[in-house]
Image (cartoon, rainbow, N blue to C red):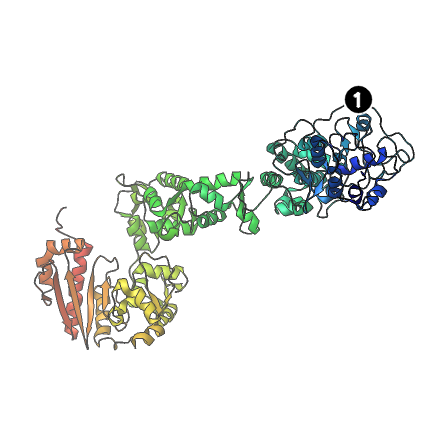
Amino acid sequence: MNLSIRQGRLPFASWQTKNGTGEPAQDYFARLVGEGYQSSARVHANEMELNGRNIVLKEILNELLLLPLPEDRKQSLVRWTPIWNGNFHCLAGETLRKRHVSFYNRRFCRACLAEGPYHRSWWDIVDFKICPLHSVPIEQETSAGDRIKWWFPSFESAPDGEYLPRPQPRAEELDGFEWYVLSRLGVVASAECPVLDSAPLHEVIDACAMVGRLVSNPWTTKTPRAAPGDCRRGFETLRGSATDVEAAFVHWLEEHVSQDERNRGVKNAYGWFRRAALWSDVDIASRRAFASVGRIGRQNLKIELPHQEFTIKEAAGEFGADVRGLRRLAQQAGLVPKDATAASRAFLSRERVDMLHAVARDLISVSEAASRLGCSQQCVRKLAKSGAITAFNNTRLFGAAGHGLALRGSEIDSFAQSIRDVTCTDGSGQVHRIGYLARQIGWTDAQIVEAVLAGKMSVCRVDRRRKGISAWQFEAVVHKKPFRRQVGDREIRRIEAAELMGYQPEVVTILVDANLIKTRKGEDGRVYLDRDSFEAFHRKYVNAKLYLDRLGCREDQLEARLLELGILRRHARLPTRNKVYIVERKSMERAIGSLAHGGDPAIWPRFREELANVCPSFVLPASMGGRDVKAYTATRVTYVELLRDGRDLIVRKTFRKGAHREWAVFVANQWQIREEWSVFTWSKKTARESVTAEFRISTDWDVEAAAVALRSLYMHFKNPRKLPKR
């Protein structure tokens, strides 16, 4: 209670004047001072021991509430006085920031003063520029250009005597920013604004000011100066539905920001605007608008955005594929340039996503492609490697861990049609199938297919019982091999190299394709292995499978055993049908000791020379390499085992029932074979119905007898007779 009340003297001459709707405490205070014919509310406040120089609205309100006013008038003063609560000014249930209001200099609408000569609290809102009830500007100067301070006690006249009220008929502006402010304060009927209705009034003013400043200026990184109409312009943008607001942002982006700039991200596209603290609904609308015309990341966003572009991850999720495989597929299919920026590789348009999905749906595995083409899977891989058909690696769709090749089914079908359309010469002689012909001429199936389709080779007939490539038959006489000759000193046959290293012949071919062993052309025009290159490879590497007994493990335990001994596999990624274990010879010797098992038997060179003269079809290496050897025929239809036993050599042949072709030949001709191999020692038939014949070679006579016996065996398989019908 102030001094005047304590002394029994009332602070005002009268308080019968009613406070109007929207009138705050400080302006009602000034009116009461004027009724006492005093010239300054500030001086009167100082006399009442109030701070008149820097007014504190709560002090003035508390002073007025001590007056014997009706309760409704007191509640009106409380409602319309913007009291500071430490964070915001509270006005009519809404909140305003300090910068949103100004009390020291009076602002006014002349038409409203004509209806009632008192101050309205919403005039103190800095961005309240137009009176929405009369559609006239809010003024803050007299006609003479002077400003009226809050403490001037009259609201009808200015200090210079100018009459301020100016009657004017109502002309309500229902769709402006000011009308919306009055509706939020409860002065007029509420105006719906879906994006802003949930925001407090101080957020509404901030959002309208920022958005208005954005749409009124071109793109810039520097915050533009505030203009008087920013809030009104911003409200025009934000007053519609969320869709309308997004459309307004899109229009500004397309008008002021290029597509390249929009592709650099949302922060770059909006410039200074992204630094503004916006109400969440407005921020979401700006992001959704940008997502439809620009490139925006997916990090830390819990809202659904209408992206115009899709990430590889989203495309993979939509298709149900592994994102790493689909990324590789997009690069290999040319849908994402390999030299593009990281962002360009990560984002795809809807059109490109549809193209990528179409390619992925068209993919088939190697086994399916082989079935459609009627060839082996190895042939398919060779065709893909040569570029005859398109293949994709590491798509994670087929094969172990998804690393198998994937091929386009439509392209395979077109390729299969080309195969069916091949014209035949209709020859009548002996024919070879493609697999046999490939072995005879030293080509791969894929090379023959490409030669046929290019018109460099011709197909004799087509076997209607088969399909695709497997149905082709080639005239034997056209591709007959020349007379076998001894290779030169600088050359070595692949079959001989395979025997020396203990690999299948196709492994040697893969080593050549990988440029680990070089080739050279012989005098007969055929391609052989370069002996120096082969010997260098053989000196450096060995086949770990040959030493299972010394490693103390089975074949299925070999990989783990090598790791245990610290022996690293080399060239492990070679595309072999079965796993090969190529290790360095030095590493193996450090682990298990010397790999040498003594030299060749003394009879070996003589036996090799005799067999080359009598039956050259059996391919023998120049040296046994310190181990037992399997001597195959050139066509690999049969083999014999050559075992070392000191200075002697043992020839052993086992006929097994499981080897169907060999067993059929043996059963049909066993008495003749036994007679021709009379020098061999024959075992009885075992429980598994296998029969073994052995012969020890220690003299020249033994060498000649063994060579003749092997030639007779070869003749049984070259021209099989009396085979039982299946």
Left/right of residue 450 with respect to residue 235 in the rendered view:
left
Vertical placement of residue 125 versus 506, above or below? above
Which quadrant of the rendered structure holds the N terminus? top right
Q: Nearer the viewer, residue 332 or 370?
A: 332
Q: What's the residue at 20%, 66% (across, down)?
A: 641
Residue type, label 1: Pro
Where's residue 498, x and y in %? 30, 64
Q: Position of residue 431 (x, y in %)?
A: 27, 47
- Image check: 631 left or right of 150? left
Residue identifier under label 1: 169
Q: Quadrant of residue 553?
A: bottom left
Residue 485 visible in image? no
Q: Residue 562: where, in percent of width, then height?
A: 32, 68
On screen, residue 244 above or below 300: above
Q: The residue tagged with tag 1: helix, strand or loop?
A: loop
Q: Is residue 13 left or right of residue 189?
A: right
Residue 371 placement, left or right of 722:
right
The answer to which of 107 and 639 lies nearer the viewer is 107
Q: Is residue 250 visible?
A: yes
Residue 659 location, quadrant: bottom left
